[in-house]
């Protein structure tokens, strides 16, 4: 049994080895086949590469032949063009050479002509010199004859002739001067009207008018007796302390305070209103309330001046000037509130200065300060112009501001655009209808004075003040006054009115010269 098993295992091992050997031989034969196939493919690829290389060589040779052919053709074309251009240049050169010879011939001919002309001119010059010398000699002889005949020397005769010529030309000169003066006035008026129109249309201010009285309303009429006090001691204390007239009449529920000083009248009004609210009306209480109101008003006017300057964009400014600006609220001129007038002037002057290329801010500063002296006229002697200029100099204001203060009433000529704008704005604000009120007597007196100044001139028939005294029409005798003298007459009348009459705004002097020829057909 064991033997069989051993024999069977040996047989199996032998068969396994044989199978392995056979498999090895089979694989080796397959490898040889693969190698042969790879060699065959490699030969085919090599053959294909050789074939492609041959084709590439043929393509290169063809391209080289084609490029050589194109190169030869391009060389031939360039050579042909070169030869053609050389022929053209030769022809042009031959043509220019021919023209040059012709021009040289013409130049030689012209040179000959110039030479002949020069000889002729030299001859003419010599002839002219000879004639000039003869003319001078003849002139001397003629002058000697004239001197002997007229008894005048050469210089005297020349002076006489020039004098006559000057008299003949005088009328022509006057006509030319009048013409250009008229044109200049027309252009200046047009430009001024444009600037004023721009300013007035861009600023619309309220009418700032003030009255001479204030009305204090009372809750009951019994308070009138308490205001009067025992034997009138309260009302006497009030009038003495406040500096106003207190009018107590039959008007129900009201008393009237009268004073030309708006500041004192405003303090008095506020003092009496507080006394009425408090109910204790007696001299000691009156003084206490008055001092309190005075302090409040001092602070109020400073704050108002500071606010106005800030609104106008004019900071910084000295505190004393701020107080004075605030006090203008309580000043009036011809019934026009001074602060309202100054604000209007500041805005108008700023607009006009900007239109004329000036400093708008500086013009506003000069406008708000131009009447600053009116805040001091109740306390110091002198005109508001001098007082205003002095206080502005003291606090180092700009020279343009000082000039505007003097110029707006004619104390100086305006030196700058800003000062001129302030003067124009002041006239606009003061002269517009309704801005100011004047008493009838002063108005009539002023109008009469204007007419008397005009009628006092020789050659004037009539003079009429019209347009509320802002224009005077002067009728002159045409046989005594000519056109040129009419211009001088209007200037003389206007200058005399400026010196002798006080008036707001400006007065137009219109001289009328008229010639009438009358006849009748019968």
Image (spheres, grey):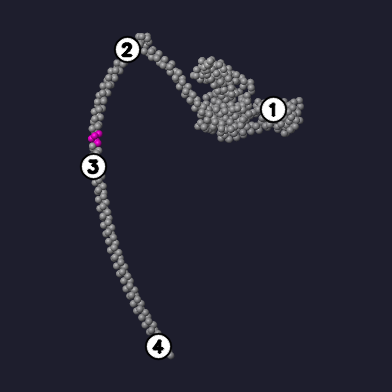
Query: Residue 90 — which label?
Result: 3
> Which region is colored magenta?
99-103
- Mark 2 lies on a secondary structure that is helix
- Mark 1 lies on a secondary structure that is strand
Sequence-first tag of 2 and 3: 3
Residue matched to label 2: 141
Q: Is residue 400 visible?
A: no
- Mark 3 lies on a secondary structure that is helix
- Bin the neighbour count of mark 4 within 10 Å (Cα to Cα): few under 14, some 14-19, many 20 and up: few
Query: Residue 219 — which label?
Result: none
Q: Residue furthest front?
A: 522
Residue matched to label 1: 257
**Depth-wise, is mark 4 or mark 3 nearer the camera?**
3
Q: Give how far across and how far down residue 251 sits, in percent.
A: 73, 28
Residue 24 is covered by the magenta coloring = no
- Bin the neighbour count of mark 3 within 10 Å (Cα to Cα): few under 14, some 14-19, many 20 and up: few
User: What is the spatial separation of the Cα atoms under label 4 and label 1, in whole angstroms?
Assistant: 163 Å
**Depth-wise, is mark 3 or mark 1 nearer the camera?**
3
- Bin the neighbour count of mark 1 within 10 Å (Cα to Cα): few under 14, some 14-19, many 20 and up: many
* CB under 8 Å between discs 4 and 2: no
Sequence-first tag of 4 and 1: 4
Query: Residue 7 — which label?
Result: 4
Sequence-first tag of 2 and 1: 2
């Amino acid at each position: 049994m064991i033997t069989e098993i051993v024999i069977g295992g040996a047989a199996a091992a032998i068969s396994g080895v044989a199978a392995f050997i056979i498999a090895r031989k089979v694989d080796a034969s397959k490898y040889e086949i693969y190698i042969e196939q790879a060699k065959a493919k490699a030969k085919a690829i090599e053959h294909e590469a050789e074939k492609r290389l041959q084709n590439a060589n043929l393509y290169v040779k063809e391209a080289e032949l084609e490029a050589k052919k194109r190169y030869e053709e391009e060389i031939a074309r360039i050579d042909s063009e070169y030869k053609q251009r050389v022929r053209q240049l030769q022809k042009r050169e031959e043509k220019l050479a021919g023209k040059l010879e012709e021009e040289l011939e013409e130049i030689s001919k012209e040179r000959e002509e110039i030479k002949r002309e020069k000889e002729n001119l030299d001859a003419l010059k010599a002839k002219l010199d000879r004639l000039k010398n003869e003319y001078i000699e003849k002139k001397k002889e003629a002058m000697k004859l004239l001197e002997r005949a007229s008894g005048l020397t050469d210089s005297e005769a020349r002076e006489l002739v020039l004098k006559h010529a000057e008299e003949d030309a005088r009328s022509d000169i006057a006509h030319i001067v009048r013409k250009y003066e008229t044109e200049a006035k027309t252009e200046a008026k047009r430009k001024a009207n444009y600037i004023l129109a721009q300013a007035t249309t861009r600023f619309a201010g309220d009418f700032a008018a003030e009255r001479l009285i204030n009305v204090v309303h009372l809750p009951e009429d019994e308070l009138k007796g308490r205001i009067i006090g025992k034997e009138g001691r309260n009302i006497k204390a009030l009038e003495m302390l406040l500096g106003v007239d207190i009018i107590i009449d039959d008007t129900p529920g009201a008393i009237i305070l009268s004073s030309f000083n708006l500041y004192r009248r405003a303090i008095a009004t506020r003092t009496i209103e507080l006394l009425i609210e408090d109910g204790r009306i007696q001299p000691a209480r009156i003084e206490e309330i008055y001092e309190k109101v005075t302090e409040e008003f001092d602070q109020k006017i400073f704050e108002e001046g500071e606010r106005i300057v800030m609104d106008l964009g004019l900071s910084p400014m000295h505190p004393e000037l701020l107080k004075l600006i605030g006090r203008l609220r309580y000043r009036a001129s011809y019934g026009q509130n001074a602060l309202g007038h100054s604000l209007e002037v500041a805005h108008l002057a700023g607009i006009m200065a900007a239109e004329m290329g000036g400093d708008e801010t500086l013009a506003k500063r000069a406008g708000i300060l131009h009447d600053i002296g009116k805040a001091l006229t109740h306390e110091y002697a002198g005109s508001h112009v001098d007082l205003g200029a002095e206080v502005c100099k003291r606090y180092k204001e700009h020279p343009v501001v000082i000039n505007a203060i003097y110029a707006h009433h004619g104390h100086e000529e305006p030196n700058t655009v800003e000062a001129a704008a302030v003067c124009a704005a002041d006239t606009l604000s003061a002269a517009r209808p309704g801005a100011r009120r004047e008493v009838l007597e002063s108005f009539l007196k002023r109008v009469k004075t204007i007419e008397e100044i005009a009628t006092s001139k020789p050659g004037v028939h009539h003079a009429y003040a019209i347009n509320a005294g802002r224009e005077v029409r002067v009728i002159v005798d045409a046989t005594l006054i000519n056109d040129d003298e009419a211009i001088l007459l209007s200037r003389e009348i206007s200058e005399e009115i400026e010196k002798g009459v006080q008036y707001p705004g400006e007065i137009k002097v219109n001289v009328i010269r008229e010639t009438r020829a009358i006849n009748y057909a019968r």
